[in-house]
Amino acid sequence: MKVGFIGLGTMGSLMAGNLQKAGHQLVVNDLRRTSAEPCLTDGAVWAGTPEEIARQTEVVFSSLPGPAEVEEVALGAQGILCGIRSGGSYFDLSTNAPSVARRINAAFAEKHAYMLDAPVSGGPAGAATGKARAVGER
């Protein structure tokens, strides 16, 4: 599957790396291209904007610092919503505000696309081992 990943910080880079190890083709973006270097070295493709990622992939994941960044990446002028196709899916793995997640979900629904708020816990160790869990999961 061709997968997009936005936000390659401590958690995101490890989760994106696990997707690559599982055989998925990655298209990546981060504010700092240097953060993407490990994924790029392993065959990922760089995209200049979240919109470009959404246009090129079947599903998009993001792992970002907080609600403001999530909202900009999802709904901004070159955000995921601009490029996602009908039936496309976006999973936000960040810790987000419920009001922001609802706003993003509504905007995606208007385009017949899906936004799922899926924050993870487990820290870097969980991300590295692939054992990061959805918040609330036991």
Image: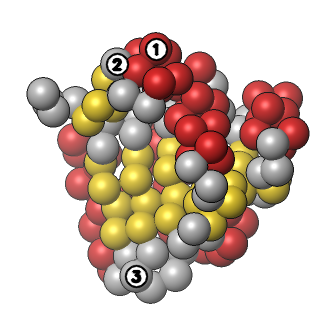
Q: Mark 1 and mark 3 in contact? Answer it, CB < 8 Å.
A: no
Q: Position of residue 136 (x, y in %)?
A: 14, 30
Q: Residue 122 carries which label?
A: 2
Q: In terms of secondary structure, where does tag 1 sit?
A: helix
Is residue 108 visible in the rendered image? The answer is no
Task: Find the distance from the CA under tag 1 to the CA under tag 2.
Answer: 7 Å
Badge 3 or badge 2: first in the primary sequence: 3
- In what element is the residue under mark 3? loop
Residue 114: percent from left, percent from top: 34, 69
Q: Could you tell me residue 5's position as x and y percent?
A: 60, 49
Query: Measuring 63% from the left and 25% from the top, which residue is drawn there?
Result: 9
Which one is closest to the eye, mark 1 or mark 3? 1
Tell me the crowding category of disc 1: few under 14, some 14 to 19, or many 20 or more residues within 10 angstroms, Cα based: few
Q: Which residue is drawn at 47% across and 24% down?
A: 129
Is residue 57 visible to us here? yes
Tell me if label 1 and label 2 are in contact, CB under 8 Å: yes
Q: In this view, does 110 lie above or below 121?
A: below
Quarter of the image where the C terminus is located: top left
Residue type for callout 3 = Gly
Q: Nearer the viewer, residue 121 or 65?
A: 121
Pick whichever of labels 1 and 3 is earlier in the sequence: 3
Where does label 1 land, which residue? 125
Q: Residue 87 — which label?
A: 3
